[in-house]
Image (spheres, grey):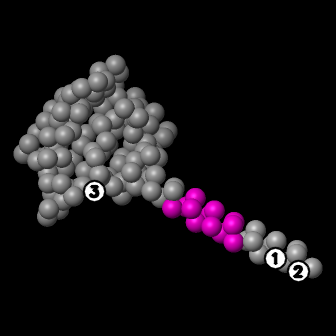
Amino acid sequence: MWWVGGGCAILLVLSCGGAIWGMTSLVRSFQTGGLSCLPGDFPRYPGATVTRDYTFVGSGVAAGDSRECQETLDSSDDVPTVTNFYSKGLNSGDWRVTSNDKTTGQIKFSRASNPQNVGVIQFLGRGEHTQIEIKFDS
């Protein structure tokens, strides 16, 4: 009887520890963009934390699109530094900047291989850090 009780107690402790480890890994993966709705080759700002990630599929998206991704990130860097990173990153690989409006703090971009895949990034200064709002239609 003591062996069964002790075995159950050990199993319970191991299960709780595994659940806690799994949840913290999932949260950490989300915060670093591991579960992002953005394509894998989309430029990721180093050290930015994901604060919101939504995917819309079906009738709620723009005409001609099948999916819309909206993601918000926070960075401890200032707006010019973050804007410079995305201006360069979205002008390389399969990405192209279509418009860079410094007065509104917006960069519009598209995929080179599929120009119908378009998006916009809005940079919002929050004191010494930057909020990055990304919308991507595909």
Q: Nearer the viewer, residue 109 or 48?
A: 48
Q: Residues within 10 Å of mark 3 (few under 14, many from 20)?
A: many
Q: Is residue 16 magenta?
A: yes
Q: Nearer the viewer, residue 29 or 52?
A: 29
Q: Which residues are magenta?
A: 13-24
Give coordinates of residue 72: x percent, y percent: 32, 52
As drawn, is 18 to the left or to the right of 45? Answer: right
Task: Check disc 1 and report its element: helix, strand or loop.
Answer: helix
Give coordinates of residue 49: x percent, y percent: 33, 55
| Pointer 3 with pointer 1, Cβ within 8 A | no
Residue labelled with disc 1:
6
Q: Quadrant of residue 127?
A: bottom left
Residue labelled with disc 2:
2
Dot in front, 3 or 2 = 2
**Measured along the vertical axis of the image, is residue 76 above or below residue 58?**
below
**Measured along the vertical axis of the image, is residue 4 above or below residue 124?**
below
Given the current orientation, which residue lies at the most extreme front position?
3
- Which amino acid type is marked by label 1? Gly
Residue labelled with disc 3:
74
Give coordinates of residue 102: x percent, y percent: 8, 42
Task: Check disc 2 and report its element: helix, strand or loop.
Answer: helix
Q: Main secondary structure of the magenta part?
A: helix
Identified at 47% across, 58% down, the residue is 27
| Pointer 1 with pointer 2, Cβ within 8 A | yes
Given the current orientation, which residue lies at the most extreme left position?
103
Identified at 21% across, 28% down, the residue is 91
Q: Mark 3 to mark 1: distance in Å? A: 47 Å
Identified at 62% across, 63% down, the residue is 19
